[in-house]
């Protein structure tokens, strides 16, 4: 038995999800004629109280489409130095949109309204035009940390004052929502666009959704085609997305409990130097300075437990729906047993 904690993207669709995919009515979505894609988009838009939604192959694509649609070449966007759009999307901000980045160092990947306001360029011909702020919730690189909603609202006020758009990389937004009890509608009201991933903790094999108003999504649709993301009988994938949104949101709590358990096991061992607070389903820990994280990854691999190094000093483990209670117990025990 392999226990795969490398990412929450490794989940496989179960029988019920596969049945939903099998039974989905299909059409050509480039002609807007796939009933299942249309249903997923309407369902997601309703959930967030937003006007429209766009189904895309990946979260990288939904983020990159949002950036392209909100900006013009030569603009600047503001984000935290840990953000996925900056670190893990292959330089797409400059490649796709010709936009430069003003990186801020927030707290656990979270920037605040004062920092944002100070980073906005005044309106002079010779200064770069600031046009977009991007937030991430939960923050992957900060160990799945959760934003305070009031901090987001304060940033929104700054955006309104300076006429900036506000985008959310909500790849794991539902992990935050099940912890805070906040609703998708609250997020729909504050953000000009939201990206959510169906293929992370929600367990769908493929797909992300971009949400916004009707005019924004119409322009985003054109960009999606240019980026090569216009899919044909995509309802077969959208059906998995509908199933995921209807069945797999509340159970994210279980993933968080398992991450907590793993966190508690890591607190007891001497090879861990520092454990980031475990707020959702991501566990990140720094190893003792005299050890290379790869040694621990390899030791766990010999026990059939897969995880990844994260930067030069740390290791990341991610819980998800294919990690059972038994597997979680094996992980906790193995963490304490490995010989270095
Ligand atoms: C996974 C992820 C994405 C999108 O990744 P894809 O693999 O392209 O779907 C975007 N943002 C964050 C924070 C992520 O964790």
Image (tube, helix red, strand yellow):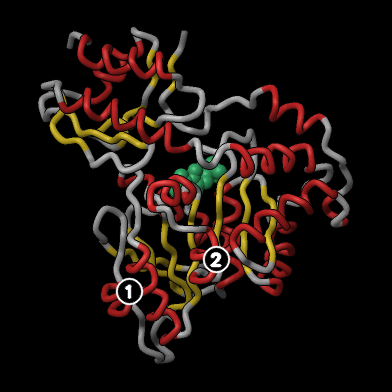
Determine whether, in the image, residue 106 is placed left or right of residue 193.
left
Q: Which mark is residue 173?
A: none
x then y, percent, for residue 271: 14, 22
Determine whether, in the image, residue 32 is placed left or right of residue 93.
right
SS at mark 2?
Answer: helix
SS at mark 1?
Answer: helix
x then y, percent, for residue 316: 33, 32
**Of 110 and 320, which appears nearest the observer?**
320
**Residue at the spot 37% in from the left edge and 19% down from the top edge:** 328
x then y, percent, for residue 238: 73, 43
Tag 2 residue = 188
Tag 1 residue = 116
Circle 2: is it few (<14), some (14-19), or many (20+) Cα within 10 Å? many
**Of 169 and 24, which appears nearest the observer?**
24
* Screen quadrant of the C terminus: top left
Upstream in the sequence, badge 1 or badge 2? Answer: 1
**Residue at the spot 50% in from the left edge and 35% down from the top edge:** 251
x then y, percent, for residue 234: 78, 43
Circle 1: is it few (<14), some (14-19), or many (20+) Cα within 10 Å? some
Determine whether, in the image, residue 50 is placed left or right of residue 321.
right
Determine whether, in the image, residue 143 is placed left or right of residue 95.
left
**Residue at the spot 62% in from the left edge and 57% down from the top edge:** 47
Q: Is residue 290 visible?
A: yes
* 316 lies above or below 26: above
Q: Quadrant of residue 155?
A: bottom left
Q: Is the CB of mark 1 within 8 Å of ligand 1?
A: no
Q: Is residue 90 visible?
A: no
**Residue at the spot 32% in from the left edge and 49% down from the top edge:** 145
Q: Nearer the viewer, mark 1 or mark 2?
A: 2
* 324 lies above or below 206: above
* 245 lies above or below 131: above
């Amino acid at each position: 038995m392999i226990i795969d904690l490398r990412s929450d993207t490794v989940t496989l669709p179960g029988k019920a999800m596969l049945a939903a995919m099998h039974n989905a009515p299909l059409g050509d979505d480039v002609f807007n004629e796939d009933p299942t894609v249309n249903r997923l988009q309407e369902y997601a838009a309703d959930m967030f109280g937003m006007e429209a939604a766009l189904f895309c192959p990946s979260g990288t694509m939904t983020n990159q489409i949002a950036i392209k649609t909100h900006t013009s070449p030569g603009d600047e966007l503001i984000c935290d130095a840990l953000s996925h759009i900056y670190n893990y999307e292959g330089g797409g901000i400059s490649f796709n949109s010709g936009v430069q980045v003003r990186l801020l160092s927030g707290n656990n990947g979270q920037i605040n309204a004062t920092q944002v306001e100070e980073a906005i360029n005044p309106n002079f011909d010779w200064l770069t035009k600031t046009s977009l702020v991007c937030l991430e919730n939960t923050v992957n690189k900060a160990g799945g940390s959760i934003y305070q909603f009031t901090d987001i609202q304060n940033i929104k006020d700054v955006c309104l004052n300076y006429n900036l758009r506000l985008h959310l990389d909500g790849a794991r937004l539902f992990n935050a929502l099940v912890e805070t009890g906040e609703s998708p509608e609250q997020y729909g009201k504050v953000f000009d666009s939201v990206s959510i991933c169906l293929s992370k903790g929600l367990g769908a094999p493929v797909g992300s959704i971009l949400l916004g108003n009707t005019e924004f999504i119409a322009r985003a649709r054109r960009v999606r085609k240019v980026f090569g993301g216009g899919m044909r009988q995509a309802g077969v994938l959208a059906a998995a997305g509908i199933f995921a949104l209807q069945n797999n949101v509340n159970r994210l709590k279980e993933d968080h409990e398992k991450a907590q358990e793993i966190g508690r096991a890591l607190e007891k061992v001497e090879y861990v130097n520092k454990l980031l607070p475990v707020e959702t389903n991501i566990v990140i820990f720094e190893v003792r300075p005299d050890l290379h994280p790869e040694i621990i990854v390899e030791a766990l691999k010999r026990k059939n437990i897969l995880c990844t190094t994260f930067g030069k000093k740390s290791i990341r483990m991610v819980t998800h729906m294919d990690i059972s209670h038994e597997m979680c117990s094996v992980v906790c025990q193995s963490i304490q047993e490995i010989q270095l």
